[in-house]
């Protein structure tokens, strides 16, 4: 029995390591296609032995998986990192536990179909509906650093990768069960060939299809091209306000921009300049012209009529009312209510103040979940601890994906060209359906602005960067990604990196991106895989409930 327990522990450890490696090591996404087999083998062995309290065994394996891949969250918030690790692992363990319950009521392959459908339905819930959402470790993300394998994401989206992971692992596990049970020797030669061909097709078919798609996928520029200049400002987010005054930050980036703009071959050509998320925090909505940063940027773009400037800001909005305008509002020392936004602004020589706000907010640092419950608690706790600003972030979400646009003006001042741009702010770039919304509204370019310096030199910023490559494939859009500390990059429509910055260095990227209005299958029809798996899960869950109820009766 002790030997069997050690074997189960080794199998669970092998699972945790194998499934973690694609997030930690480049070009090993294929390991996810075999990583679940040790987990399934451990479960089968534990069930055969009647091992008690096995829940805690596989919960520990899921904790190791989460810890190995996302420990870096603790660099930004220790409590939040520990909570994310334990809570996400617990949800994974509950799903696996429900699968074990289903094995008592379903026979054959049905429990395993239930497991795969339930897992992908949970991932879709995270991506689309959950108020507290952490879809970082969706299995389809395992291929973010192996993009040559998943060019077909333009049809299925990222959850197609999750389905591939489950299909291959269950196929391999089924073959192993057939061999161990002696079923294999009782099969006919035709059954042997059919099973091996089927498993080979599931394993290698998507890889071959991806290679074909990659070779035949050409950059589209049916909507033209755009000159883009991005500044990786490289200010430590933990120290930037105290160590480097905003005036000096503004002077540094405007100097970089003006040097690059002055060396362009055609100075009259429309260009887009991009700065990262939360570059400044001195902008009040409705009074932008009084912001020193805004004044500096306005003075710069006034000299370049065809230049558009996109930049991130921690923006604020004041309300001079007696009543609280919104449950998320706080008060200044002068008893003025104000709201916070994580915003992206677009301006040009006309002085326009177009703005979008981040909607997919990070829980705790930006978002107070279930505000009717947690805002009063946060107010009470902040008074108790003497923290008048509150302990949790209260950014106001926008609610839907909206576009900004770069504009070119004619001699008489009329707009002669518009380039609609989707601007996912930081965390929003990991949500396929959210980014799909930009393209449905006409975006011909995606520009991700982010600030990844909170995590330091850890796997976190590299993982986050790689997810932008998945969005490029799903949407077949060029990505102009501007980060504060790295990685800033131009990514083409095949998910390949055209040019990129280093980490934690000031950097200026200048390139020409292709613009296209074509919509992929995924953009037109959405997440079919996730919807189908959710449907299958609901049907099978109802059948399981009925069977459990009948037994009790």
Image (spheres, helix red, strand yellow):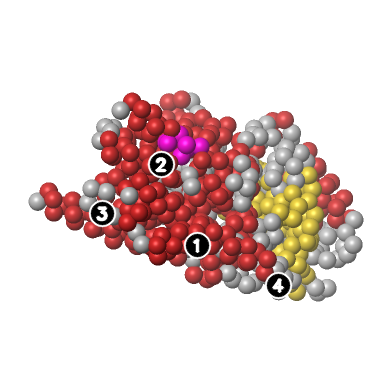
Residue 451 quadrant: top right
Asked whether 292 or 498 is in front, the reply is 498
Q: Which is closer to the viewer, label 3 or label 4?
A: 3
Circle 1 SS class: helix
Q: Which residues are magenta?
A: 11-17
- Figure check: 52 above or below 496: above
Q: Which is closer to the viewer, label 1 or label 2?
A: 1
Judging by the rendered image, the residue that carries numbered circle 2 is: 39
Bin the neighbour count of mark 1 within 10 Å (Cα to Cα): few under 14, some 14-19, many 20 and up: some
Give the alpha-carbon distance from disc 3 to disc 1, as whole Å.
25 Å
Judging by the rendered image, the residue that carries numbered circle 1 is: 201
Q: Earlier in the sequence, mark 1 or mark 4?
A: 1
Residue at the spot x=74%, y=49% of the render?
500
Q: Is residue 185 visible?
A: yes
Q: Quadrant of the N terminus?
A: top left
Give the alpha-carbon distance from disc 3 to disc 4, as whole Å.
54 Å
Q: Earlier in the sequence, mark 2 or mark 4?
A: 2
The location of residue 445, given as percent across then percent down, is: 67, 63
Q: Is residue 15 magenta?
A: yes
Circle 2 SS class: helix
The location of residue 359, given as percent across then percent down, is: 52, 53
Residue at the spot x=25%, y=54% of the render?
107
Judging by the rendered image, the residue that carries numbered circle 3 is: 107
Label drawn at residue 223: 4
């Amino acid at each position: 029995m002790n030997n069997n327990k050690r074997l189960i522990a080794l199998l669970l450890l092998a699972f945790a390591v194998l499934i973690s490696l694609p997030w930690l090591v480049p070009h090993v996404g294929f390991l996810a296609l075999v990583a679940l087999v040790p987990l399934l083998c451990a479960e089968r062995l534990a069930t055969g032995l009647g091992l008690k309290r096995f829940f805690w065994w596989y919960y520990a394996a899921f904790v190791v998986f989460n810890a190995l891949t996302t420990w870096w969250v603790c660099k930004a918030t220790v409590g939040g990192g520990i909570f994310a690790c334990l809570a996400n692992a617990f949800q994974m363990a509950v799903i696996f536990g429900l699968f074990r319950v289903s094995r008592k009521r379903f026979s054959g392959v049905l429990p395993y179909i239930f497991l795969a459908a339930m897992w992908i339905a949970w991932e879709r819930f995270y991506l689309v509906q959950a108020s507290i959402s952490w879809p970082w470790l969706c299995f389809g993300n395992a291929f973010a650093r192996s993009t040559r394998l998943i060019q077909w994401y333009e049809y299925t989206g990222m959850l197609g990768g999750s389905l591939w992971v489950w299909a291959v692992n269950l196929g391999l596990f089924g073959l192993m069960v057939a061999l161990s049970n002696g079923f294999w020797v009782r099969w006919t030669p035709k059954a042997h060939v059919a099973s091996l061909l089927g498993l080979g097709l599931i394993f290698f078919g998507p890889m071959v299809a991806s290679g074909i798609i990659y070779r035949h996928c050409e950059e589209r520029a049916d909507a033209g091209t755009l000159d883009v200049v991005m500044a990786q400002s490289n200010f430590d987010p933990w120290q930037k306000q105290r160590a480097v005054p905003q005036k000096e930050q503004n002077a540094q980036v405007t100097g970089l921009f003006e040097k690059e703009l002055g060396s362009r071959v055609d100075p009259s050509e429309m260009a887009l300049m991009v700065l990262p998320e939360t570059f400044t925090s001195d902008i009040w909505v409705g009074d932008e012209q009084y912001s020193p940063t805004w004044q500096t940027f306005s003075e710069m773009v006034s000299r370049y009529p065809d230049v558009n400037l996109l930049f991130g800001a921690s923006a604020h909005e004041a309300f001079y009312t007696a009543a609280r305008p919104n449950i998320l509002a706080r008060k200044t020392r002068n008893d003025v209510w104000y709201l916070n936004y994580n915003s992206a602004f677009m301006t040009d020589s006309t002085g326009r103040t177009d703005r979008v706000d981040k909607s997919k907010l990070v829980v705790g640092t930006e978002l107070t979940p279930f505000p009717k419950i947690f805002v009063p608690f946060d107010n009470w706790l902040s008074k108790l601890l003497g923290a008048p600003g509150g302990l949790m972030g209260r950014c106001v979400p926008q609610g839907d994906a909206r576009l900004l646009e770069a504009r070119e003006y004619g001699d008489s001042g009329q707009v002669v060209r518009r380039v609609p741009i989707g601007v996912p702010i930081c965390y929003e770039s990991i949500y396929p359906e959210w980014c799909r919304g930009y393209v449905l509204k006409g975006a011909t370019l995606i520009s991700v602005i982010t600030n990844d310096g909170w995590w330091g030199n850890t796997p976190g910023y590299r993982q986050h960067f790689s997810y932008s490559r998945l969005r490029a494939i799903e949407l077949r859009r060029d990505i102009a990604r501007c980060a504060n500390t790295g990685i800033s990059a131009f990514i083409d429509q095949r998910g390949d990196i055209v040019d990129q910055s280093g980490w934690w260095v000031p950097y200026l990227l200048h390139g020409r991106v292709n613009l296209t209005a074509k919509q992929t299958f995924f953009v037109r029809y959405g997440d079919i895989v996730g919807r189908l798996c959710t449907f299958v899960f609901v049907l099978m869950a109802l059948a399981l409930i009925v069977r459990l109820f009948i037994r009790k009766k």
